[in-house]
Image: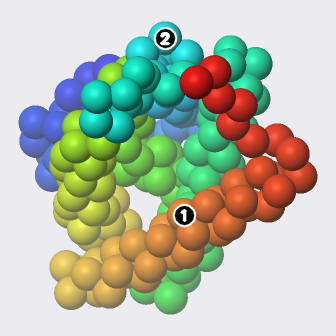
Amino acid sequence: MITHVWGLLAHPDQEWQQIRGERQSATRLYFTHVLFLAAIPAISAYIGTTQVGWAIGDREPTLLTEASALQLTGMAYLAMLAGVAVMGAFIHWMARTYDASPSLSQCVVFAAYTATPLFIGGLAALYPHMWLAMTVGTVAICYTVYLLYVGIPAFMGIPEDEGFMFSSSVLAVGLVVLVAMIASSVIVWSLGIGPVYIR
């Protein structure tokens, strides 16, 4: 797992070819990769919001109660796991349009490895500062998009022009999933499961 993470950061073209040649089950990947990496932003956010806090101007830092932060980060963790599965299922469904025939497990593997920069970028939540979050978040999103556009043609074994269209479709669905997750969080907050501030 760690070698693939490093390979995707150092030489993504070669690494996608290597990942494509492996036969990993989605279940094994979830237990060896997704469960571990999705915990990085969740744990970082819990520590950052309960121990460090965030401040506007010269005010004292605002913190969340531990119970509130645990609820919110737990739901965010589950949402990340579900997001990888949904994106994998969409990639599998969309592959038929481009005459590619990967298995559902391979598509979930692809979605999980593509999301790796987002998971690692979650370390920025240890210090919840707006500019740090925006900078790290932007870099993580850009590299995730880069991995997607480089990876689809290599992983699916399709021409680059088709890979561009495929990747653009996956990116659009990813944005829809993100908006759905934000809308879901608003609904959950309206039900009374929201942040509880210390100050």
Label 2: which residue?
51
Relative height, residue 197 to residue 79 (above, below): above
Side of 166 relative to 138 (left or right): right
Residue at point 75%, 41% (across, down) = 194
Query: The N terminus appears in which quarter of the rendering?
Result: top left
Disc 2 element: helix
Instruction: Please report contact status of discs 2 and 1: CB closer than 8 Å, yes or no.
Output: no
Label 1: which residue?
178
Outermost residue toward the left in this view: 10
Residue 30 point in image, percent of width and height: 60, 32
Disc 2 residue type (three-letter): Gln
> Which disc number belongs to residue 110?
none
Q: In the rendered image, is residue 179 in sight?
A: yes
Residue at point 23%, 37% (across, down) = 132
Relative height, residue 164 to residue 126 (above, below): below
Relative height, residue 129 to residue 110 (above, below): above
Counting other residues with Cα less than 10 Å from the Cα at mark 1, is it few (<14), some (14-19), or many (20 or more)?
some
Q: Nearer the viewer, mark 2 or mark 1?
A: 2
Disc 1 residue type (three-letter): Leu
Side of 23 relative to 57 (left or right): right
Disc 1 element: helix
Query: The C terminus appears in which quarter of the rendering?
Result: top right
Which is more N-terminal, label 1 or label 2? 2
Residue 193 point in image, percent of width and height: 82, 41
Residue at point 87%, 45% (across, down) = 192
* Spatial separation of the CA atoms under disc 2 and disc 1: 27 Å
Residue at point 15%, 52% (across, down) = 13
Residue 108 point in image, percent of width and height: 55, 51
Residue 125 point in image, percent of width and height: 39, 29
